[in-house]
């Protein structure tokens, strides 16, 4: 190793950055070469000079205090804003979520089922028939008059019965429009009460037991039988309307 | 992490290096007042970006921020010719090596060394502080100051030669052959 090479290695050597493999050769050269040994000693002296305590500036206490105070105030501001932001956001998000949920529930709960809608429709139809004085298209207490009247007006033949013997005299029939189709409406009477019995072909072929629903002061009874769906609606009390349904179901059907 | 926990962690891991931060800022800025400003701003920036700290070397991380804060401060507060980039290539290594090898350097007194360091260009000063006072490796200094290792080594070599020259001048009467 010559001095030129050694000079390039002395600094990494004193800095502890020289590869281990190169160290013995450099140390040998330093031992043998006074100029390089002097360079090495001077470098050591310089390094020691630079490590003198007074050369290292320690942070003044006021700086330390200021930094800590500044941090603290930032944390407090941030925490306050942070928590405020957070709470505000949470509150907002929660209220929005709650509102959405509530709306969803309201919509879901208040949205009538198909059957509820139909029930409502039937009551409206019943009320309308009474209000408009259009309860009957065919006025007849004779079931043999009423039944043929429907022929050609409907794509089905509704069962028509006279329940005069059970004190539910048939007073006539009418065409109506329910559940998106034309239906037969048979009108019965008990004293001053009218009973509208809506009939149309059932979607399901199976029989369905009678279900009762009071709505707006009217009683509605619905059942399915013999491929037909029946809706009886009246301001009659439940008991009497049930009787009517019983009587109609067991009553004798008019043969065409 | 809660803001208070974050601050606590910061005080435990980063703030113990406030001395190093101030020391570097003090050597770079050259006076106590500016150094305090730079160090304080650097600490607050460090806290702000504490989330990006990966926990490897808090002192190196803080000093990187001090260094960046200082150069930003320098651009704003000092004339551009002084803040101008150091041309590493333009400065010949040999011109400061004059008689450094022919004198027998003794350990100088602090005041003399301080003056010698202060006379160094800021980029040289920085490398000297990081290597000699903070004990960072070439690689760490290169990462910290965002320059290649070769540049760190050449700056350090030239800084040392200039320091030796300055200090040798002080000891001229006692020069020994």
Image (cartoon, coloured by chain):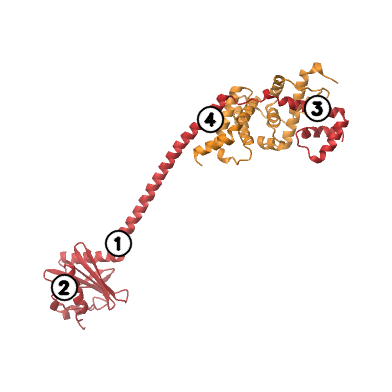
Q: Which residue is mark 4?
A: A68
Of callouts 1 and 4, the N-terminal one? 4
Instruction: Kindly check if marks 3 and 2 are in contact, taking CB atoms under 8 A apart as contact.
Output: no
State the CA–CA distance, disc 2 to disc 4.
Answer: 92 Å
State the CA–CA distance, disc 1 to disc 4.
Answer: 65 Å
Of callouts 4 and 3, the N-terminal one? 3
Q: Position of residue A42 (x, y in %)?
A: 79, 26
State the CA–CA distance, disc 3 to disc 1.
Answer: 99 Å
Image quadrant occupied by the C terminus of chain B:
top right
State whether discs 3 and 1 lie on one chain. Answer: yes
Q: Which residue is mark 2?
A: A188
Mark 3 vs mark 2: in front? 3
Of callouts 2 and 1, the N-terminal one? 1
Q: Secondary structure at mark 3?
A: helix
- Classify A64 as above or below A24: above
Of callouts 3 and 2, the N-terminal one? 3
Mark 1 vs mark 4: in front? 4
Report which colour depicts chain A.
Answer: red
For the residue pair B45 and B83, the one nearer the viewer reads as B45
**Chain ID, mark 4:** A
Residue A41, disc? 3
State whether discs 2 and 4 lie on one chain. Answer: yes
Of callouts 2 and 4, the N-terminal one? 4
> How dense is the environment of label 3, judged by Cα within 10 Å: few (below 14), some, or many (20 and up)?
some
């Amino acid at each position: 190793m010559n001095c030129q090479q050694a000079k390039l290695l002395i600094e990494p050597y004193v800095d502890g950055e020289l590869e281990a493999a190169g160290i013995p050769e450099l140390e040998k050269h330093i031992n043998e070469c006074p100029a390089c040994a002097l360079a090495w000693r001077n470098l050591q002296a310089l390094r020691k000079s630079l490590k003198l305590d007074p050369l290292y500036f320690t942070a003044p206490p006021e700086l330390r205090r200021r930094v800590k105070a500044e941090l603290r105030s930032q944390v407090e501001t941030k925490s306050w804003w942070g928590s405020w932001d957070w709470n505000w956001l949470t509150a907002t998000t929660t209220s929005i979520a709650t509102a959405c949920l509530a709306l969803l529930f309201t919509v879901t709960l208040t949205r009538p089922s198909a059957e509820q809608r139909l029930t409502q429709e039937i009551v409206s139809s019943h009320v309308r028939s009474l209000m408009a004085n259009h309860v009957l298209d065919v006025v007849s207490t004779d079931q043999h008059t009423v039944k043929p009247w429907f022929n050609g007006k409907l794509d089905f033949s509704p069962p028509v019965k006279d329940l005069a013997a059970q004190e539910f005299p048939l007073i006539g029939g009418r065409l109506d429009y329910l559940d998106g189709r034309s239906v037969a409406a048979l009108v019965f009477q008990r004293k001053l009460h009218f009973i509208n019995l809506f009939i149309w072909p059932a979607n399901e072929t199976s029989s369905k037991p009678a279900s009762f629903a009071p709505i707006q002061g009217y009683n509605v009874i619905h059942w399915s039988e013999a491929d037909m769906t029946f809706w009886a609606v009246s301001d009659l009390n439940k008991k009497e309307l049930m009787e009517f349904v019983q009587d109609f179901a067991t009553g004798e059907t008019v043969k065409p | 992490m809660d803001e208070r926990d974050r601050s606590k962690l910061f005080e435990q891991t980063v703030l113990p290096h406030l001395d190093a931060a101030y020391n570097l800022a003090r050597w770079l800025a050259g006076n106590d007042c500016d150094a305090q400003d730079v160090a304080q701003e650097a600490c607050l920036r460090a806290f702000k970006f504490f989330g990006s700290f990966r926990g490897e070397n808090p002192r190196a991380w803080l000093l990187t921020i001090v260094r960046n804060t200082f150069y930003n401060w320098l651009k704003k507060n000092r004339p551009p010719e002084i803040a101008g980039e150091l041309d590493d290539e333009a400065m010949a290594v040999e011109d400061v090596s004059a008689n450094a090898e022919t004198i027998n350097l003794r350990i100088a007194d602090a005041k003399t060394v301080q003056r010698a360091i202060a006379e160094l260009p800021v980029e040289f000063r920085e490398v000297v502080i990081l290597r000699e006072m903070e004990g960072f490796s070439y690689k760490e200094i290169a990462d910290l100051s965002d320059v290649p290792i070769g540049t760190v080594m050449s700056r350090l070599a030239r800084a040392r030669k200039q320091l030796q020259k300055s200090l040798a001048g002080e000891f001229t009467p006692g020069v020994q052959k």
